Image (tube, helix red, strand yellow):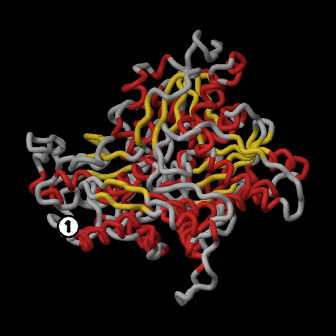
Amino acid sequence: MMAYSGGDEFPCVVGEVGSYCTKMGFAGESYPRSYFRSTTAILRDTKQRNKITKRSHDFFTRPLGGVGGGGGGDLNDDNTHTSDSNVSGDADKGWEVCNPFESSTGLIYEGLSSSSSRSTNLSSSSSPSPTTAQPSSPSPASMNANDDDDMNMSIDSPQQQSKSNTYEPLSGECYTHFLNHLSHGYETALSTDPSTTPLLLVERSYNPPPIRQKMVEQIFEEFNTPATFLARDAVCACYAVGRTTGTVIDVGYNGTVVTPVYDGYVETKGILRSPIGSRVMDEHIMYYLDALYKTKKARMKLKNTNYDYYMPLYQIRSKNHLPRREPFHTLARLDVARLCKEDGSGAGVASTGYVSLHDLVSGDGDEKTEPNDMYQQYAISPKTPYKLPDGTQVAIPQTKRFDVTELLFGKDGGCSAQIREEAVQKARDTLSSITPSDCESGSGGGDDDLNALAHLEEMRKRRRGIGGNSSGGKSSGSGSGPGSNNNKQQSAYFSHEKLVKACAPYFQSSIGELTSASIPAMFCNSVYKCDRDQQAQLLGNAILCGGGSCLSTSASSASSVDYKDGNAMPERIREEVESIIHMHTPQWRVKVSSPGLTERAVCSWLGASILGSLGSFHDMWITKAEYEEYGPSIVSRKCP
């Protein structure tokens, strides 16, 4: 049996498919070579919905063109689009937005419930809030892989737009997008054949075992890799800062996850998740940018626009300034808010003791107390100028910048608490909707779990021709061989019914992981769930990572801030956590370790790159021969 190792002798590929971006590169390198958005646009065949004809990773700044179009994003000499005469109707007709991760739960998973029931369930659980202000935000259904059933329908009215949010999930669709993201990284920046290079894949710490087995199965069956390994993202984040024990605070795009790691192993009983992440902050920035733009428009009497919100870049370039259909329009506006946040103008970290004005105003609008000195200091500070895509320059108050980050710390009264409660309830409803009805009472484990896994193993062997004969119906996918993508979509091998039954007990337990607490409270609650002899080391060592934590105090870009300013987020977390611990344990010290702002967003990938470059790592690979002998269940033994 051939042994694989990292380093120059046998370079392995390190990949991480996140909810915001996908990162791929070689082990031993300090930064990924391939870095692209995980949210992509797809164009299906008009006759076969399971066949994807085109994909696009760049759809924020230009229309994509209708069905059979040539893209619609080329610019003329006068800086206008070739297809901008009917942007709202035909610019993106037939295109859909997909992401391998479910936005509420963060799982690589597609629901089995019908289109009408799931769409109704998700829409009823959401209520109006500042984060979902004008224009209407896309529902989770439209954000996750599928859109309307009629691919030739132009969406011009709210009735048609609401109809487009109902969809019928395709079996195995999320894994198709997951593999396509890895293939895109292989083909673009790496130029490497997957069948000749081992793959070290970074996964989420709360992934259920059946989903982990499914990922390993897909990697070996589709990519034919010689060896693979699934590394937990929290463990890799510890390796990136030179530690094996600590509590990892990962502020991602779709949420924040706090994971205790002890001696290189994840303590799953202490994992806590919050749906508040970078996307919610971007929505909050989009909300107050709209308010500032509307005020500026009324004051300066701006013309050449009929909209009360800031227009994204594609709408500025268009002749008639017509918006695209959802969710493309909202995603383009969120991209502007993201750029504002990353520039430092849209969000910032206030010092400890800052209290938002929301906490100083009662429900009837009467002020309870005067603003504290720190709030008054920031209120009279010079405002931060920011230029919108149309050239309009707005002045962002410092207090608005800090209120965005207070969504994570909760120092703004009941405003952020209400937003967090709504997001948590929405995620719980989503988990409940995708859990089979016969497993909701807790009877989904035991023999049913084993039978579901055995069924997956049987389908794997049947597809590879090891044993049994494939049925001749449509569900077996026979006719074009195992290399046909169409048959894979229709085969029982991709059926999620058995996979859902295997995951049902884990879905029920993961509902308890969801919390609406702030980051300091999540940190303490996560540690207190672990064993008593582990709490001292976990409380004293915190690791901060994730793209949502790349915030500073001053309104400067991440490349120009000094070390002290870039360390504002870790220092704020340290002071907030120590204030909680000192209530019962005075003089306790907490050390928050975190890479610089440029490496914080790729912290997990960096730790996996270090792990893959170790010479002693070659014994940890899951080889192709071991997979053939033991099946995908070997991942639970070799990748704890």
Q: Give the residue at x 42% y 52%.
A: 338
Residue 320 lies, with reference to residue 26, above or below; the image says below
Residue 87 lies, with reference to residue 64, above or below; the image says below
Query: Where's residue 404, x and y in %?
Result: 52, 62
Q: Is residue 153 left or right of residue 37?
A: left
Tell which of 13 and 118 is nearer to you: 13
Element carrying mark 1: loop
Q: Assign the C terminus to one quadrant of the image.
A: top right
Which residue is at the far top? 9
Q: Give the residue at x 38% y 30%.
A: 483
Residue 395 shows in the view: yes
Query: Where's residue 356, x and y in %?
Result: 58, 70
Q: Say what amino acid the circle numbered 1 marks.
A: Leu
Query: Where's residue 294, x and y in %?
Result: 30, 70
Tell which of 457 and 512 is nearer to you: 512
Residue 476 shows in the view: no
Q: Assign the N terminus to one quadrant of the image.
A: top right
Q: Is residue 319 left or right of residue 35?
A: left
Tag 1 residue: 302
Tell which of 98 and 477 is nearer to you: 98
Could you classify mark 1 by the number of other residues whose Cα lies within 10 Å: few (under 14), some (14-19), or many (20 or more)?
few
Residue 639 lies, with reference to residue 250, above or below; the image says above
